[in-house]
Amino acid sequence: MRGHAKAFDTAKEKLGLTDSLYLGLRTVPVDSIVGSVNRWRDFDARFRIKNRHTMYRYQQIKKAVERGSTLPPVSLYKVRDKYYVVDGNHRVAAAKEVGQAFIDAEVVEFFPPPDSEPNLIWRERSIFEHKTGLSGIELTELGAYDKLLMQIEQYRQEESEALGVDLSLPNAAASWEQEIYKPVVALIREQRLLDEFPGRTEGDLFLYASYHKVAKSRLTKQNVSYKEALADFKVPRPDKSFAEQLKDLITSLFSPDPGDTCPYGLIIDEDGLVRVARDCRGCPHCRDCAADPSKLPTEDELFDY
C-alpha cells in the first residue's frame, strides 16, 4: 500500500478555509470521500485500512455492509466537491471496498473567506446547491448561480401551474435538470461546443443560450414557456449545426456592441443583464416581428424587464 488518505488540515491550510455551514443529512457519493480529519494516516490513498490493530472491527463493519444492515450515518466535512471523514472512517472504507455507490452522512461544509472572485463564486455555488439539491453544475462568472436559480424558480412556477400542485424548489430543480438542463448539455457535448469557448463550462453555455431564448421570446411578445424557449436547441436546424447556432448566439452575447443591432436575436449582455439594443426594431431573424411589424414592442416595452 502506498501513500495515505488526504488530510483535512492540509486542505484547510492550503485553501484558507474559515467559515462553515451545517448542511444536515445528505446522501454522498462514496467516491467523493477522499480523506479524514483525524485518522488519515490509518488509510492509504484508496482509503484501504493500514492499521492492523483495528482490522477485526473493520471486518465486522464490512460484513454488516455486505449484509445490507442499516448503519448510522457517517460524519463528513465538505470542501468544494470532496469530503473528509470526521466519524465513520471504517464505514467509509468498507463502503469503498464493497463498491457501495452512496452513503448517508451528516455534512458540514467549509468555505474560504469572501475576499476574491473565485471564493465568492465558490460560496454562490454552495448556496445554489443547498437551495436546489443539485450538484455538479459549474459556472465561472460571479452572479451566474443567481441567474440560474431564477430560471429554475420560473420553471417551478410554470410546472406548479400546469400540474395544479405547489412544487417544492428541490423537486422542481430535479425535474428541471432532467427535462431542460441535461438534454441541452448533451447536445453541447455531442457537438464538442466547449472546444469553441476555452475557459467556459457547459453550465456557462447553457445559461447564455437559455437567457438568449427567454429574452427573444419576450421581445416577440409570445407566451412561450421555459421548455418551449429552448426547443430550438434540442432540434438543430437543417441549414446549421447545433454548434453553429449556439456559437452564433453566444458570440453575440460575449462580444456585444451597444451601438449595433444584434443580428442573432436582438439582445446584448450589458452589466450581466440581458437587454435589447435600444436602436433595434426587428430583423428577418425574428420571423414573427418581420412578418407583422405591429408586433414590434415600443422602446418602453423593450426595457420593461
Image: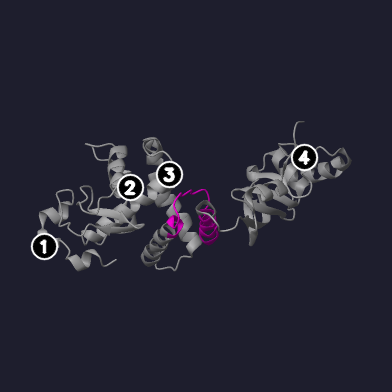
Q: Earlier in the sequence, mark 3 or mark 1?
A: 3
Q: Earlier in the sequence, mark 2 or mark 3?
A: 3
Return the x and y of residue 31 as percentages of the image width and height: 64, 42
Residue 98 is labelled as: none
Relative to 94, say whether 104 is above or below. below
Q: CA distance from mark 4 to mark 2?
A: 47 Å
Instruction: Write the start and end of the magenta stretch as one range.
Output: 120-146
Q: In 3D space, how far apart are the residues under numbered discs 3 and 1 (Cα atoms)?
A: 37 Å
Question: According to the image, label 2 marks what residue?
Answer: 254
Amino acid under disc 2: Phe
- Look at the numbered discs 2 and 1 and tell me whether their residues touch, using CB distance below 8 Å: no
Cα distance between the residues tagged 3 and 4: 35 Å
Q: Amino acid at mark 1?
A: Ser
Q: Is residue 41 above or below residue 266?
A: above
Q: Is residue 72 magenta?
A: no
As helix, strand or loop, the secondary structure at mark 2 comes to helix
Please tell me how crowded label 1 is: few (under 14), some (14-19), or many (20+) other residues with Cα within 10 Å. few
- Residue hosting label 3: 202
**SS at badge 3:** helix
The circle on residue 294 is: 1
